[in-house]
Amino acid sequence: MVIDAELMPWSAKAGELLLRQYAAVGSAAEEGFGMAVPLLAEAEKRGVDVGALHERVAERASLVARYRDAYRRYCWEVAGVDDLRLAGFHLLASEGAVHVDQNHRWHMEMLGRLAHPDDPLLVATSHVFVDLDDADSEAQATRWWEELTAAGGEGMVIKPLEFVVAGRKGLVQPAVKCRGPEYLRIIYGPEYTLPENLARLRERSLGLNRSLAVREFALGVEALERFVRGDGLHRVHECVFGVLALESEPVDPRL
């Protein structure tokens, strides 16, 4: 079987990134603001007009604390394979068949059957189905996402029910990740929620990203078809290298 899954914890596959980028930024910022805030408070007590600056620095210090809390949620100690978890999303293929003709309900049901309480490695992924013609269904899904992210969850991936969907302009983007506000703090930095930063992020161009996602999806399906059909590895790798080449395409740096 070929299974599309997420390896957890995040820190198990991104230890160097966590240490050298996120933790380094958080530690340096926490140290700097930890000195600045009390010094500004002391200056204010002496009658120096630093009120606005004091408030600004204190706000930035609180955002740094939230940044550190955010990435720490996705880390736990890993001593061996028994401490890892795989959250399954798709049963992409099995002997003799590629399962892109099955809808996502089928995929989640099959992966739920494969997950077993006596073997915690593969876990069933939480999910909800939404009827876009039903306002109550949409509201329930929104509450589910809000509760999930408030409890520390990364977010959710929104997909059409069918695995492959074609629209007026060709293939529809197969999935869109909708992360929670605190997880986005890891991606965009501690102060991304400040109004001036949000304004800059909202001006991003997403067109190229959408185009790349659709082309990479098509190449991925073709790679699966070739692999299951028993084509030589060089034929499978043609598609894989195509995906890697697309990944190197320059996109809007604000993404």
Image: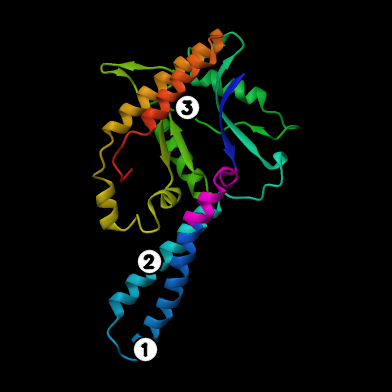
Quadrant of the frame with the N terminus: top right
Residue depicted at 49% across the width and 43% down the height: 154
- Image quarter for residue 160? top left
Asked whether residue 174 is in view, the answer is: no
Residue depicted at 62% across the width and 11% down the height: 95
Give the Cα distance between marks 2 and 3. Answer: 39 Å
Extent of the magenta region? 9-22
Q: In the rendered view, how is the structure colored? A: rainbow
Decide if residue 210 is on the left or right side of residue 224: left
Residue depicted at 26% across the width and 45% down the height: 202
Q: What residue type is labelled 3?
A: Phe
Disc 2 versus disc 3: nearer the observer: 2
Give the Cα distance between marks 3 and 1. Answer: 57 Å
Q: How many labels does the image show?
A: 3
Residue position marked by numbered label 1 in the rendering:
45
Q: How crowded is mark 1: few (under 14 residues within 10 Å), some or many (20 or more)?
A: few
Quadrant of the frame with the C terminus: top left
Give the vertical position of 127 relative to 215 (above or below).
Answer: below
Decide if residue 40 is on the left or right side of residue 109: left
Residue position marked by numbered label 3 in the rendering:
129
User: What secondary structure characterizes most of the magenta part?
Assistant: helix
Q: Which amino acid does label 2 sit on?
A: Arg
Q: Do the residues labelled 2 and 3 touch (CB within 8 Å)?
A: no
Q: How crowded is mark 2: few (under 14 residues within 10 Å), some or many (20 or more)?
A: some
Disc 2 versus disc 1: nearer the observer: 2
Residue depicted at 29% across the width and 81% down the height: 50
Q: Which mark is residue 60?
A: 2
Disc 3 versus disc 1: nearer the observer: 1
* Residue 68 among those drawn in magenta: no
Give the Cα distance between marks 2 and 1. Answer: 21 Å
